[in-house]
Amino acid sequence: MSTQEEPPKTEAQADSDAVGAGLDFTDPNSPLARYYLRSSHVALAATLALILVLVSHMRLWHTDVWAHAAYGRYIVEHLRLPEHELLCDLADQQLPYANYQWISQAVFYLTYRLGAWLAGGDEVRSLAGGVEALRILFALLVTLRLGFLGAAILRMTDSGWLVVAGVVLAALLGLPNLSVLRPQGFGEVYFAVLLFLLSGRAFSWRSVIATVLLLIVWANSHGSYLIGLIVLGTAVFFAALGGLLGLVDRSSAVRLAVAGVLSAVGVALANPHGPWLFLLTLDLANHPNIADMDEWKPLDLRSPWGIAFLGSAALLGLTVASHWLLRLSGRTEQESPRPVVLWSTKYTLHIPLMHWVLTLLFVQQTLQHTRFNPWWVPFVVWFLAWQWHTVSKLIGKPLADSDVPSLRKTIIAGLFVSVLLLWTAPAQWVMNGEPKPIEKTMHEATPWRFVQEIQHRDGKHYPGLADWLNKHSPGKSLAGRIFCTETQGDYLTWAGEGKLPIFMYTHVHLFSPRVWNDCQQVKMGSASWSDILDRHDVDIILAEAELFPGLRRRLQTASDSWEIVVDETGDRRKRDRRGRILIAVRKLDGAEPVKAAQPK
């Protein structure tokens, strides 16, 4: 039996790899050879580790996560799913609660509890531990999303340097989204995994099982599972068409079709609401209150998201134009196996039909809804990576890794990652023996000091508020309601364990249009603001001072009935104006006015 000899190494390679007693770190027959890395892999490992470090030190955003963690607390403690809204009595209690994100909600709560338990100590230290754990979770979700996107690019191009370029580009384009921990973060990871599964040159039965399980978990983690089903359905259609035309492996196309059918059936059956889940999800997306929120409005091209979108669109246009110019000049590429869903012909202008259709869909949705940007970013990077791969072959310089994999490079990658991981938030926690104080880990707009004053009334944070509380409500319970903006209300739902009488939080789809409109009118300081507060028995107002100047002016002119006890307008100690709050209280009959706390 003949054996194929390995190509002889150059003298330079032999000198660089032979160490000690003739050890060869690039020996392909070594049992560890399959784990050897190339230079691009070292760069990728360092890039992902650096991203993990940076994101783990970002302040935890003040919205979204807290209300979802509050629902997760109910799910874990009661071992059942909520049927209606739980956290605010002004919400529409007749609406059914759609449990398409119960997994992520439970994970948020369990993550917080783990961090609080590890931190131990008093109330504030436990809070710091819980916040630290949530920050770590967020960093892991971001890194996993970019890691799976990189794996998808590697699977379809076999180019490590294209993977590094794609991961860096996705991280830069996604910077405007790099702040909020919400169930959507799980959906973004699942989307990257789906792109990975669709990037293979064949679609195996193992991929069928993985796809079905992925979509089922996705449908119980976030409502964006509909995006996954749309992308999968598009892939099924074009794989089937390619199979009929003889352009792709027909058996892979059949297996992909099976995955599509089973995923749709699995999603429809394996969720708390059965097939009704689809209608509940669409009802939420079309709720009139949702349309008033900034992130659901059309994309502002001057915003950070708009600039990122324009940049990615320009890059996509330049790449496709370069591809076409090379084709027009007579350049051709050597035929090679391609992903089953990415076939193209001269009739599709050498762009995969799946790319054409999804690009049109994603561009339309992104321009119409700012919040669609997190789905556009990984898709456009996935598209670009394939085009760059094609263009490199057309110019005769394929972007393939040419260096030799070696154990030395693997060790270097391990050292890079190990050193960087020492700077992550969890490593710093271990080395310091305690989590960072919440002043450094929570976003400035999180009203934790307000809650502390409501609960303890010791004047540690807001003496004027504590004095008013002790006079107005000597007991622990509040006599009236707290008017809070939806962004301030999120943390109150968590810290108050659903017992604080608040006005609103970010799940605005759970409120009737009338209540949501009342909240908007008060925030703007409209003529009916006082009547609305009287009707809802509001005694305390908590809002972002500089975001709602109309409300602030109304309070200043209503000194006979309202007192501003905290006004952080222009407070330079808080860099983000969303963190500069205003607290006002209803004036007590015969009481001396409370001097508002002013920024120093």
Image (cartoon, rainbow, N blue to C red):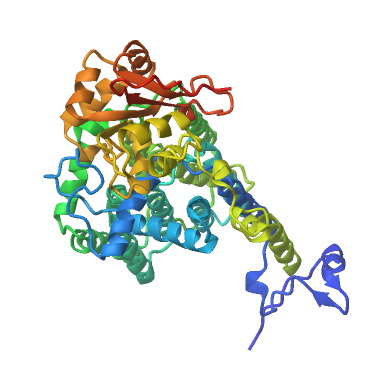
570 sits to left or right of 100: right
Image quadrant where one finds the N terminus: bottom right
Location of residue 282 by image quarter: top left
Q: Residue furthest left?
A: 94
What is the number of callouts on the image? 0
The residue located at (45%, 44%) in the rendering is 378
Quarter occupied by residue 16: bottom right
Does any portion of residue 239 appear in the rendered image? Answer: no
Residue drawn 39% across and 52% down? 191
Would you place residue 552 above or below residue 438 in this image?
A: above
Q: In this view, does 600 lie above or below 329?
A: above
Residue in front for this viewpoint, 408 or 546 = 546
Q: In this view, does 566 lie to the left or right of 396?
A: left
Which of 329/158 is in front?
Answer: 158
Asked if residue 192 is positioned above or below residue 375 in the image, the reply reads below
Q: In which quarter of the image is residue 452?
A: top left
- Which residue appears farthest toward the bottom when viewing the image? 1
Q: Quadrant of the C terminus?
A: top right
Q: Where is residue 462 in the image (x, y as percent from the top left)?
A: 47, 32
**Can you see residue 228?**
yes
Residue 406 position (above or below residue 276): below
Pinpoint residue 568: horizontal percent, then vertical percent: 49, 24
Q: Please give the name of the residue rendered at 15% of the width and 56% of the height, measured from the top-left corner.
A: 275
Q: In this view, does 222 lie to the left or right of 195?
A: left
Looking at the picture, how far across and down is residue 515, in whole percent? 19, 30
Residue 63: give x, y in percent of width and height: 40, 40
Residue furthest to the front: 590
